[in-house]
Amino acid sequence: MKTLLAVLSLIIITINITAQTTYGDKSPVIIGAKGKVNYVKERSIQRKVPPELSHYLAGLLISNNINAHTSSLNAALDVWFKKYNELKTAIDKVQDANLKNQAKLRLAEGNFTEVESIIKTKTNYSSLLHTFPKTYQTSGSESPIIVGDYGSVTYVVKEIITYKLPEGLTVNLLNELKSKDNLVKTQRTQLGNLQSTIENRESVIKDYISRYNLVKEKLKNSPSQIYQRAYAAFSKGNLTQALKELDLSAQHDKSYGESSILKAKILLLQLNYNALDSSLREIDKSYNIGVQLNPNGDNTFEYGKFLSDYAGNYPAAIVFFEKSYELTTDQRRKVEILNYLGIAYSTVDRIKANDFHEKALVILEGMEPIQDKSLIVTKSLILSNLAAGYASGYFDIAMINKSIAFSKRAIEELDKLPTLSEEDQYRKALYYNQHGKEYAMIADTNHAIACYNNALSFLEDAAQRKPYVFTIGLTSVYYNMAALYSTTGQPLKAIEWLSKAITLTEPKITPGSRIYLVATVQLYSALVSNYASLNMLSNVMASLNTINALLAPFVASDPKTFLIQRAALYTDLGNIYLNTNNIDSAQKYISGAYDYYSNNFSAAQFNKQKFALCINLMNEIQLRTGQTANAALYNRNLLTKLTNSAVINKFVYDDFIPQIYAQLAKVYATTNQKDSALFYIDAALNLVEPKAKQYGTTYLYTYFTYAIQGYGMSLKFKDYQNARTRAQSFRDNCTTILNVDPFVKANMQAVIGECISGFSVVTFQYTQDPATGILPATDLNNLYLFAEEYFNEGEKYYIVAVQRNKNETLKYAQALYYAAFLQYYWATKSNTAAQQQSHADKKCAIIKKVDALLKPVPVNQFVTALNNQLAFINTGCN
């Protein structure tokens, strides 16, 4: 079953396996991958090199087109053995036992550049670059880039032998692995969201071999002479010649349509990454001709899969999947098509996506009892896709519970298999990972941890045995476990899990294993968030600088793919520099990120939060540097782009529109244009408030952000009645939201308390802002009364929250401190002794509440900081 993620492929080089005979060379010829492995093994033992490297070295010989005569093989191997022994001698001289052992392990994998990095040495690679040009490449520096890691090359050569494939397919299979590791997929595969797709090395190779064999059988069984000639070339691994033969087919008839489909499938087996766009256009052209001349269910389905999996054109894919469904009568194929329809629609309309998966489930349940293993696995996959679909829409407790039920059924369905293969166990572990995340969404920590531990019971051992197969799955569980601890106020535990994950992924980063780079960047980004919550700025900067260093060589070699990652990094760096008032550095990084996003607008779909942060930071930096006219222009241009894009893909772009309205409101508030400022903030609220009242959790905090912005603007323009009306509207709607969304009522009362108390904080800050000027005593007193009222109402929600979840205690205590500080300050502005005493008494009463709240809480840096703040204002309290 294919993944829902779009996949692009790297370069696939077709090699004619016929041995190239050197004139006059009388040495024996070693034919086939198995023969080469056995020969290399003998030579390795003779040269005292670990025989475990035999498959890897045979792969290097084949993929670099080394002549099959033993004289040529020996010459090439001698070059490699010389480098091996040179580094082995260097390792023996290392004094540090730990470094020596690390270097020996990497040498045993043939990873020369990693050995050099560990023991801090540089050697000459000119001979290796000359002998193995497709393996050892250089970007202009002294250190070569090794294309193809030990694990992948070894695995591919073993599979070539196992399935008795032409050795010429070695490079094609290696590049197929890299194609599934491509960033277009991994951009959309956030670690915490890995679902049921098993995109490991084994499944990728099996899928490729399956596609190869289907084409081979189609050619073999055809009576056409053209097909027979194509088969003769294809079966020897000469895919290029097979394509030339198919081009001889008569055009503009049904048979030409069929040969065009075959041509497209062969081209997919040998994508040229160096000319990827033109390759994809050629494949698309062949498929298009095929479905026009022979539009049957199979051909339209295959074209839809190409558009979905390779081109990432889901709207176009949907058209062909729907056409295929109409033309198909086989129930099993209908299930497969419906699953693809659900996957394609999940990018544009999640309600329809769920509908198609439900329809597939109905067909499968009509086949009960299911005995066929593949159908059992398919049913479990459909159930898992439904679980993911219901968990990823608007947050609703009923939908999450439905998601949990589907995940449970997916696991139960797999357990119907008589025995679970390693792949089935992996799938089950990922189901548990998804199941745990669903429980975490409703704050059921115990069930979430139990699910994650179930996943770990298989993955931790499996990753030890097969690290290049299971590491990403294991890392995904660690990532989700960290997220759980982070959201429950335990950032130190989250940091432990993230650090543990990084030790697995970072050492595996190579030019040929980009997925480990993407995973590591995600992990460091999560570390940044947790360090920031602990105010550990030096750790934040260190992590961001590490990300920058990791990305640098990939950006340099492949900017088209990796600039999106750098834009996200620059956004984070710009945010930190802006918060520390380093305007020049902030402008440098924010402008760099903004330029990328504005020229690559579709990148928003890969990380909506980062895109939103970037455009907000650009607005902020322009306002801080007095570029208000530019800020207004940038926002209006963005609004036009977003409005047009939302027509095509509402799910991705719709939520950015109120953000731009709010940014425009801030621009006009800065330039004291009251009517325009309030017009735009109301435009934002008019879009978000109905969604908050309908969906609750998903939009609650966004709604508050715009509500508090409008409140602050009304204060700025001294329209206190309008400010009161805005605050009251938010308070009333919180009651509505509590009734609409049971999850908010059960788990987010502290958030509502924080939001309502936020009106108090903004009110007090307004009275202290020099721009406000000197307020009349009556106005000042009324504003303090407003602030007191909002604190008191916010406290009602905090009390309920702490009764249900003790982790909310510190948040409640912090809010009480602000309330106590208000009374402390208010007393200094009171005119009579009685008023001063009244505010002092209120202050002391609040401080007593804080003391009682903090008494059972273990002392940590937050508690210590809060106690220090209270000590400053507790004068006169017992």
Image: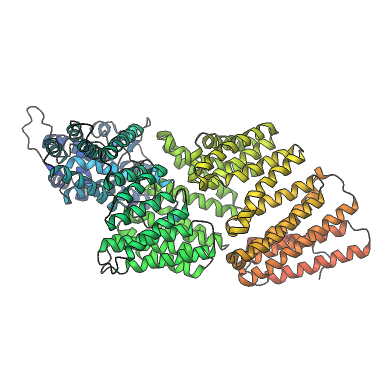
Question: At 75% across and 36% down in the image, what residue appears?
Answer: 671
Asked whether 459 or 142 is in front, the reply is 459
Please provide percent x and percent y for residue 241: 18, 33
Instruction: For the N terminus, give its image quadrant.
Output: bottom left
Please provide percent x and percent y for residue 405: 44, 67
- The image shows residue 657, relative to residue 240, as above or below, that is below
- Whether residue 714 sits left or right of residue 420 in the image: it is right
Indicate the quadrant where residue 464 lies: bottom left
Q: Is residue 593 visible?
A: yes
Please provide percent x and percent y for residue 297: 28, 47
Indicate the quadrant where residue 816 lies: bottom right
Asked whether 432 or 394 is in front, the reply is 394
Instruction: For the C terminus, give its image quadrant.
Output: bottom right
Q: Is residue 582 visible?
A: no
Asked whether 645 or 126 is in front, the reply is 645
Question: At 74% across and 64% down in the image, what residue appears?
Answer: 793
Indicate the quadrant where residue 823 lies: bottom right
- The image shows residue 744, relative to residue 28, as above or below, that is below
Q: How many marks?
A: 0
